[in-house]
Amino acid sequence: MKVIRNIKELRAEIGQHRSMASGPVGLVPTMGFLHEGHESLIKRAREMTGTVVLSIFVNPIQFGPGEDFETYPRDEGRDLSVAEANGVDIVFIPGVQEMYPQPTKTKVTVSELTSLLCGASRPGHFDGVTTVVNKLFNIVNPDYAFFGMKDAQQVAVIEQMVQDLNMDVTIVPCPIVRETDGLALSSRNVYLSAEERKQALVLSKSLKEATRQLAQEEVATAGEVRNLLVKIISDAPLARIDYAEVLTFPQLQPIEPDTRLADTGKDCILALAVYFGRTRLIDNTLFQMKEGIPHV
Ligand code: PAF
């Protein structure tokens, strides 16, 4: 496994892999502090591509003022062991100077999809994400790029960017990975106190319960599903809901409260963001419409 911190060197190394015709190039973009969710992305990339590039870069421009850029957890040594153990070929770990030698005057903005959910709570966040992902695509020129569905809105936004700008890359969304008790894996879970960690289970519990209820005809409207999510999350005294929404996916269109999910004719997402203290956790469940019935 090669560890590269410099764009020029990275391009040369990837060029060598391409000249050896070692198959498609896969990019797994991350901000490090790797967990099993990231490992699942790397494993998928390993299955689908000949050269796996893992990028580790805590991207300052996707953090707002007062957010956790400075304190975002970092552990390069451990990340490199995880990468090596999962068969990564090249780890790209640029410094901020390498990625932004001067303040960027060019930003990539995806409209509409970024004005709600996390985009509403974190203004400018998605511009930072699409700008850095665009840069990484230009640097690596991957055939495939792998993203976790825990950040479902991010996947929808990046897919839109790729389509709108005719980028020659296939986005591969990968399923959410959870702890055995249901908590979705996130690098930010380390911020939780023991009590917050315990109460954070209301996210996955509410999604699971809504899924169960959705199978029953009478509790199948968007409003009822949303109320159920809010009710279960509110059982946790430390939880402060940022949003609990039921939307079409990937269009992220609101669904009228009295509309049955099945009647939208579209795939739908139940999306949550909940604060525990200063830690903001997100989670979601996607329903795919099959024969008019929503399936998880
Ligand atoms: O999902 C993340 O970790 C980040 O948003 C990404 C895609 C690596 C861009 O910085």
Image (cartoon, helix red, strand yellow):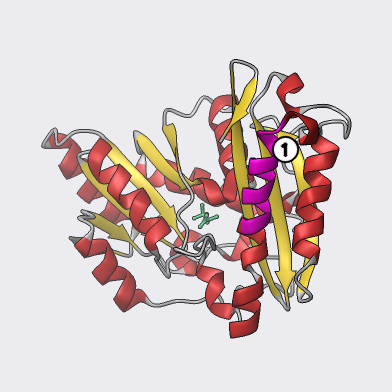
What is the total number of numbered labels drawn onto the structure image? Answer: 1
Relative side of 262 to 140, left or right: right
Q: Quadrant of residue 75?
A: bottom left
Q: Nearer the viewer, residue 124 or 87?
A: 87
Q: Quadrant of residue 123?
A: bottom right
Local crowd size for mark 1, using a 10 Å CA cut-off: few (<14), some (14–19), many (≥20) = some
Relative side of 207 to 177, left or right: right
Q: Residue at x 55, y 51 (%)?
A: 150
Q: Residue at x 78, y 67 (%)?
A: 235
In the current view of this chain or complex, which residue is farthest to the left?
A: 20
Was residue 192 drawn as part of the magenta stretch in this picture? no
Which quadrant: the C terminus? Answer: top right
Which quadrant: the N terminus? Answer: bottom left
Q: Is residue 185 visible?
A: yes
Q: Position of residue 81 (x, y in %)?
A: 24, 71
> Is the magenta region chiefly helix, strand or loop?
helix
Was residue 215 drawn as part of the magenta stretch in this picture? yes
Q: Position of residue 193 (x, y in %)?
A: 61, 84
- In the figure, 263 relative to 240: above or below? above
Q: Residue at x 72, y 37 (%)?
A: 113
Q: Position of residue 248 (x, y in %)?
A: 71, 31
- In the figure, 163 relative to 124: above or below? above
Residue assigned mark 1: 113
Query: Element at badge 1?
Result: loop
Q: Which residues are magenta?
A: 205-216
